[in-house]
């Protein structure tokens, strides 16, 4: 009798564990090494290249995170290539990422030093505007930037203040991660803490998840530049950031809840295409008035973030038409996603399945 009870108990917990693992969505972190290719980053008299230092730090962060279970790391670049700002944000959005972390090195005409981590917001000081302006100027390296960025001018405070702050709903979570990073820099590495700050960075503005931009130090300061350029410095900085990400992840409830996401046409094995139009921490009542007149809206909750979708169809072509309609209604960053059995899958996999 005891043996049978033990076998049943073992079988129950085995099935429970298997189901838990199967239903757990990976925690997706998108790592963005600033600059790259024809964009070297801020100039320095000491021979350091921001694009190279940022890339090596990011690759090391990724290496640290990939050792952990249930974490998926995606890179906006893994080599010395130029990646447009809008593509960096798009990579994170299409990956349905839980975090976006952009890594940079600071620069100044003085011998300023120390670390600072930015979240999206209206910069309250001239120095914050200066840093944002420097990082946003990368758009001038891009072809047709006036069309792609709708006249956005990094040199104009009026333009930056006029941006719609789509990151507002993620501000608290972004600040939590930023504080974790700054605390690690200060307490573990004894770096000068220049604080958690707010400024308008285009790459943060267009991501649909908690996002931060880390200025790991000043490469225009000889001592700090030497540190950032050293193997020890890059290892220490990357570990501080990866540890901060892991601490942030532990603070979240990683259970995935799906609400109002099934339409009458969805079946157990069907692939369903939807159009993601918005995301945020606020739970919005599902009615057309709240979504610029669009109906057939569904909502998915993941890691305390609500994602809102327009339409539900088994046809990719129909989904593209829905995307165009959403864009025409004002959701300029709407994009198509695919689900199977309430689990998100890549568009490529979905198209193969439907074929």
Image: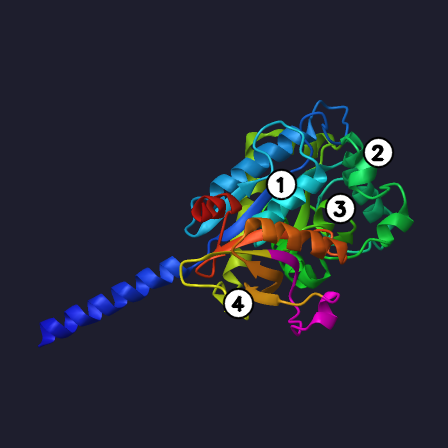
Which mark sits nearer the N-terminus, 4 or 2? 2
Front: mark 3 or 2: 3
Measuring 70% from the left and 70% from the top, which residue is drawn there? 288
Assess whether mark 2 and mark 3 are in contact (beta carbons under 8 angstroms).
Answer: no
Q: Secondary structure at mark 1?
A: strand
Residue 259: where, in percent of width, then height?
54, 70
- What residue sits right under mark 2 in the picture? 109
Relative horizontal placement of residue 152, taking residue 343 as reference (left or right): right
Residue 337: where, in percent of width, then height?
56, 52
Check disc 1: other Cα within 10 Å, few if <14, some if 14-19, many if 20+.
many
Check disc 4: other Cα within 10 Å, few if <14, some if 14-19, many if 20+.
some
**What stretch of residues is rendered in magenta?**
275-293
Q: CA distance from mark 1 to mark 3?
A: 13 Å
Q: CA distance from mark 4 to mark 2?
A: 58 Å
Which mark sits nearer the N-terminus, 1 or 4? 1
Q: CA distance from mark 3 to mark 2?
A: 24 Å
- What residue sits right under mark 3 in the picture? 202
Front: mark 1 or 4: 4
* Magenta-drawn stretch contains 186: no
| Quarter of the rendering occupied by the C terminus | top left
242, above or below 21, in the image: above
Residue 164: where, in percent of width, then height?
80, 56
* Magenta-drawn stretch contains 280: yes
Measuring 82% from the left and 55% from the top, which residue is drawn there? 122
Measuring 62% from the left and 56% from the top, which residue is drawn there? 275
- What residue sits right under mark 4 in the picture? 263
Which mark sits nearer the N-terminus, 1 or 3? 1
Q: CA distance from mark 1 to mark 2?
A: 26 Å
- What residue sits right under mark 1 in the picture? 32
Q: Secondary structure at mark 3?
A: helix
Which mark sits nearer the N-terminus, 1 or 2? 1
């Amino acid at each position: 009798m005891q043996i049978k009870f033990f076998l049943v108990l073992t079988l129950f917990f085995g099935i429970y564990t298997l189901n838990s693992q199967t239903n757990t969505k990976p925690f997706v972190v998108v790592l963005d090494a600033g600059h790259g290719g024809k964009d070297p980053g801020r100039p320095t008299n000491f021979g350091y290249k921001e694009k190279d230092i940022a890339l090596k730090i990011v690759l090391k962060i990724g290496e640290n995170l990939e050792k952990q279970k249930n974490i998926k790391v995606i890179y906006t670049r893994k080599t010395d290539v130029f990646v447009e700002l809008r593509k960096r944000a798009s990579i994170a959005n299409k990956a349905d990422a839980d975090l976006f972390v952009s890594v940079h090195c600071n620069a100044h005409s003085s011998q300023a030093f120390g670390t600072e981590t930015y979240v999206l917001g209206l910069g309250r000081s001239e120095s914050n505007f200066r840093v944002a302006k420097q990082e946003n100027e990368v758009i001038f390296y891009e072809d047709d930037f006036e069309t792609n960025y709708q006249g956005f001018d990094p040199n104009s405070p009026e333009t930056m203040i006029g941006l719609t702050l789509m990151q507002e709903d993620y501000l608290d979570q972004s600040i939590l991660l930023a504080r974790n990073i700054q605390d690690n820099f200060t307490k573990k590495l004894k770096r000068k803490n220049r604080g958690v700050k707010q400024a308008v960075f285009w790459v943060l503005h267009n991501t649909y998840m908690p996002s931060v931009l880390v200025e790991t130090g000043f490469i225009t300061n000889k001592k700090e530049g030497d540190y950032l350029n050293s193997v020890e410095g890059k290892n220490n900085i990357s570990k501080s950031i990866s540890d901060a990400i892991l601490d942030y992840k532990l603070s979240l409830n990683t259970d995935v809840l799906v609400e109002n996401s099934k339409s009458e046409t969805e079946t157990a094995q069907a692939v369903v295409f939807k159009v993601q139009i918005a995301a945020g921490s606020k739970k919005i009542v599902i009615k057309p008035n709240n979504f610029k007149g669009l109906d057939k809206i569904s909502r998915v909750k993941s890691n305390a973030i609500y994602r809102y979708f327009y339409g539900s169809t088994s046809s990719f072509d129909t989904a593209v038409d829905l995307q165009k309609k959403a864009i025409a209604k004002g959701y300029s960053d709407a994009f198509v996603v695919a689900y199977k059995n309430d689990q998100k899958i890549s568009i490529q996999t979905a198209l193969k399945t439907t074929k």
